[in-house]
Amino acid sequence: PQTGTGRGPASFHLLGSRNRVVQVTLPTSFTISNGSASMLVDSLVRNASNNGNQEVRLSNTGYFLLLVGGRLNVAANQMGGNYSGTFDVTVIYQ
């Protein structure tokens, strides 16, 4: 969950062996909802894009802060309120 204002990228703390390369896969989209109202989040991107591939290298302490953002598709006359949803991030050791 987001803290503070609730705005900004989702953050994930990746922990493992130091200097290890891991493959990160994001979904193409997901939906957030507020009761019967919903919005699509798509065009997901992450920090440290290595020339378009999905690999990141953990630090020499075995840590990487993964940040994920995306495009929120707001419809005309979208109902106001608090929206929430979930999405899966897959991390695979190489």
Image: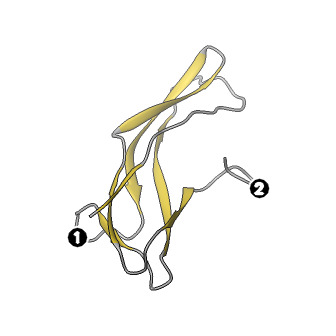
Residue 8 position by quadrant: bottom right
Q: Is residue 63 above or below residue 38?
A: below
Image location (x, y in percent) of residue 27: 36, 41
Q: Is residue 91 above or below residue 49?
A: above
Image location (x, y in percent) of residue 70: 45, 48
> Any mark on residue 71, and which?
none
User: With 89 as the anchor, is 12 left or right in this view?
Assistant: right
Q: At 54% from the left edge and 58% from the top edge, which residue is drawn?
A: 12
Q: At 26% from the left edge and 64% from the top edge, which residue is drawn?
A: 94
Q: Residues within 10 Å of mark 1 (few under 14, many from 20)?
A: few
The residue singled out by tag 1 in the image is 51
Q: Is residue 83 above or below residue 13?
A: above
Image location (x, y in percent) of residue 40: 46, 31
Label 2–label 1 contact, CB within 8 A:
no
* Pick the front one: 2 or 40: 2
**Upstream in sequence: badge 2 or badge 1:** 2
Q: At 38% from the left edge and 71% from the top edge, which residue is drawn?
A: 48
- Local secondary structure at mark 2: loop
- Local secondary structure at mark 1: loop
Distance CA(mark 2)–CA(mark 1): 32 Å
Instruction: Give the amino acid at mark 2.
Output: Gly
The residue singled out by tag 2 in the image is 4
Image location (x, y in percent) of residue 13: 55, 63
Q: At 33% from the left edge and 40% from the top edge, which residue is drawn?
A: 28
Q: Is residue 86 above or below residue 16?
A: above
